[in-house]
């Protein structure tokens, strides 16, 4: 594996003490409880109160401020001591926000991940074992009877949709500004946005370059969401849609005009290796020597910092239980191999874009 230095240091050594290892094992055993206590410490305002209390707060003061019973506050705060999100002054019994609690409260990525895991993943993860054995997203049955989450996305409950899109957009949007500079360095006039979802990238493209025309490829129901999102916005007249089920090998990319750029952002990780190869081969069929395919993915082994790699390998489990049952976040070796199998090669690699992204610029062999 092409492990970055920080990831390699964490993932290739077992150098914690036996006592630390035992505590981590117990932390794992109680992790569902850890998650819910920590989420509620945020939701119920306890961590926020402690952040703003220079001298800390007693459990009685927390109860008075939140309207919770003293019993509830004791359960929350004492569990949080063991988790490590708060600390206590043993002499005054006043609770204070710990560093981990600060990140839980203030880090944008942590907030997005917390909501995503509670609203989208939590209940479905109970069926993870089935998903691993059967290769289908059995946890998705918690919401409805769809083959993948993408067919059901427009029908999910509003709070689940909100957390799903917040998660998706947080990771992609943080990279858009840098990605636009890379993609438009050669002044493309036509761009095919494969898996364009709600059209956020398409809007950024037409706003960045006044001459480009963008075609969004996605499922018909997703294109309806895209049209609603882009309607009336600057440059929307230069965005059109092409309905396509990419899981159907017989369906081909549009051939009516030449595309300078084909763009796939946080898209290929939604498919298994056979499906990825099929999609890339069909893309290669409409490419010529001047066309470039840009693949933007959160490749877990290329992360600058290990916590990002942790988030990405855990996100792979969402794909298993909830999204489609058979895809995951890529490592470099796998992604490059699939690109090669499709008759293309990587021309240039751009790392550390935005929150966690890598762009692979590809051309036909």
Image (spheres, rainbow, N blue to C red):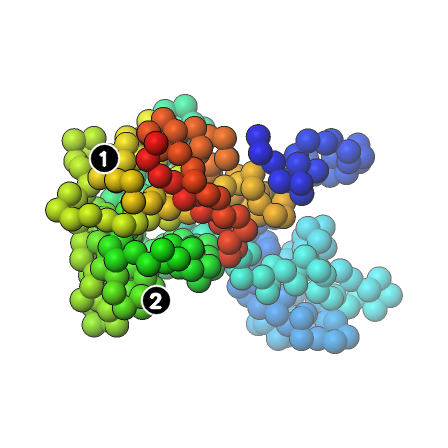
Q: Is residue 324 positioned above or below 210 on the image?
A: above
Q: Quadrant of the C terminus?
A: top left
Q: Nearer the viewer, residue 309 or 363?
A: 363
- Say which element carries label 2: helix
In the displayed structure, would residue 25 be above or below residue 121? Answer: above
Q: Nearer the viewer, residue 154 or 145?
A: 154
348 left or right, relative to 287: right
Which residue in the protein does label 1 denote?
A: 285
Q: Position of residue 96 (x, y in %)?
A: 73, 66
Q: Residue furthest front?
A: 289
Comparing 10 with 343, the one in front is 343
Evaluate whether residue 103 shows in this view: yes
Q: Residue sitting at 22 percent across and 67 percent down?
A: 236
Q: Which residue is mark 2?
A: 208
Instruction: Residue at 65%, 63% (x, y): give it.
Output: 102
Report crowding for label 2: few under 14, some 14 to 19, many 20 or more residues within 10 A (C-alpha).
some
Left of 77 or right of it: where is 350? left
Q: Dot 1: within a 10 Å radius of its alpha carbon, few (fewer than 14), some, or many (20 or more) residues? A: some
Residue 170 visible in the displayed image: no
The image quarter in which residue 48 lies: bottom right
Residue drawn at 41 percent across, 44 percent down: 361
């Amino acid at each position: 594996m092409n492990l970055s230095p920080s990831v390699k240091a964490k993932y290739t050594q077992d150098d914690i003490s036996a006592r630390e290892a035992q505590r981590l094992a117990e932390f794992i055993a109680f992790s569902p409880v850890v998650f819910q206590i920590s989420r509620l410490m945020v939701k119920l305002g306890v961590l926020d109160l402690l952040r703003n209390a220079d001298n800390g707060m007693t459990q009685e003061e927390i109860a008075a401020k939140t309207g919770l019973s003293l019993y509830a506050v004791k359960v929350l705060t004492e569990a949080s001591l063991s988790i490590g999100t708060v600390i206590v002054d043993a002499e005054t019994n006043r609770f204070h926000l710990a560093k981990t609690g600060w990140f839980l409260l203030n880090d944008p990525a942590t907030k997005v991940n917390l909501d995503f895991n509670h609203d989208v993943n939590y209940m479905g993860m109970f069926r993870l074992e089935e998903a691993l054995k059967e290769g289908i997203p059995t946890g998705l049955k918690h919401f409805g009877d769809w083959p993948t989450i993408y067919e059901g996305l427009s029908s999910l409950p509003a709070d689940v949709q909100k957390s799903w899109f917040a998660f998706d957009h947080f990771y992609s949007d943080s990279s858009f500004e840098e990605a636009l500079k890379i993609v438009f360095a050669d002044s493309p006039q036509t761009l095919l946005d494969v898996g364009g979802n709600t059209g956020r990238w398409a809007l950024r493209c037409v706003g960045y370059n006044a001459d480009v025309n963008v075609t969004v490829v996605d499922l018909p129901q997703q294109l309806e969401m895209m049209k609603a999102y882009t309607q009336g916005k600057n440059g929307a007249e230069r965005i059109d849609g092409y309905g396509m089920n990419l899981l159907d090998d017989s369906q081909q990319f549009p051939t009516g005009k030449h595309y300078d750029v084909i763009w796939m952002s946080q898209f290929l990780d939604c498919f298994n290796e056979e499906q990825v190869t099929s999609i890339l081969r069909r893309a290669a069929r409409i490419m010529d020597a001047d066309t470039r395919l840009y693949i933007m993915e959160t490749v877990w082994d290329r992360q600058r910092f290990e916590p990002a790699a942790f988030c990405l390998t855990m996100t792979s489990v969402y794909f298993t239980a909830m999204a489609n049952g058979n895809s995951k976040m890529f490592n470099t070796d796998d992604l490059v191999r699939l690109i090669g199998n499709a008759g293309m090669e990587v021309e240039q690699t751009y790392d550390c874009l935005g929150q966690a992204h890598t762009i692979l610029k590809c051309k036909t062999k």
